[in-house]
Amino acid sequence: MANAGAEKRPLSPHLTIFRPWLTMAMSMAHRISGAALYILMALLGLFLLGAGFGGWLHALTGWLASGFIGGMIVFLMTWAIFHHLLGGVRHALWDRGLYMDPQGRELLAQASLYGGIGLTVLLWIIKSLAG
C-alpha cells in the first residue's frame, strides 16, 4: 500500500499554474530551435544531395531553395542556429553557477532573445552588402 496516500499529494506545477516569464519562454524556444535544427539540417542534406547528383535533381533543389519559401527556411535556420548557440552559452554559464539570481537569469534570457535576432539580422545585412 505504498500508493495509498498518493491521491492526497498536490500535483506538480505545470504551465497553467506558473506565471509565464521570459526565462521560461527562452527555455522552450531553445528546445524548439534544437528540434527544428534537426529537420532543417535534414533539408540541407537533401539540398546537398541534389547538388551532388546534379541534373534535374540539382535543378529542382536549386529552384526550391531560391524561392521565397527556400529563403525563409534559410533565414529561420540562421536564427535557430544563433538562438540555440546563445541558449547553450546561457546554460554553460548556469552550469558554472553564474547568473543564477533572478536578475542574472532575466539578463541572460534577454541576451539570448535579442542576441539571436540581432546576429541573424546582422548576418543577413552583411550577406546583402557582400552581393
Image (tube, grey):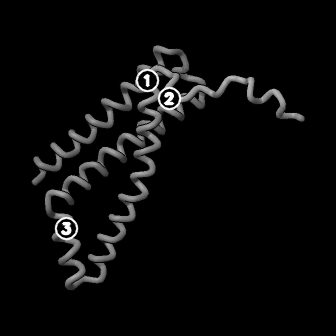
Secondary structure under tag 3 reads helix
Secondary structure under tag 2 reads loop
- Structural distance between the alpha carbons of marks 1 and 2: 8 Å
Could you tell me which residue is drawn at 37 percent across and 27 percent down? 111
In screen coordinates, is 20 left or right of 60? right
The residue under label 3 is 64
Q: Position of residue 14 (x, y in %)?
A: 55, 29
Foreground mark, 1 or 2? 2
* Labelled pair 3, 1 in contact (Cβ < 8 Å): no
Q: Give the residue furthest to the right.
A: 1
Closer to the camera, 43 or 51?
43
Residue 126 sits in quarter? top left
Would you place residue 131 above or below residue 31 in this image?
Answer: below
Q: Position of residue 50 (x, y in %)?
A: 28, 77
The residue under label 1 is 20
Residue 41 — which label?
none
The residue under label 2 is 15
In screen coordinates, is 12 left or right of 65? right
- Structural distance between the alpha carbons of marks 3 and 1: 38 Å
Would you place residue 31 above or below residue 58 in this image?
Answer: above
- Structural distance between the alpha carbons of marks 3 and 2: 39 Å
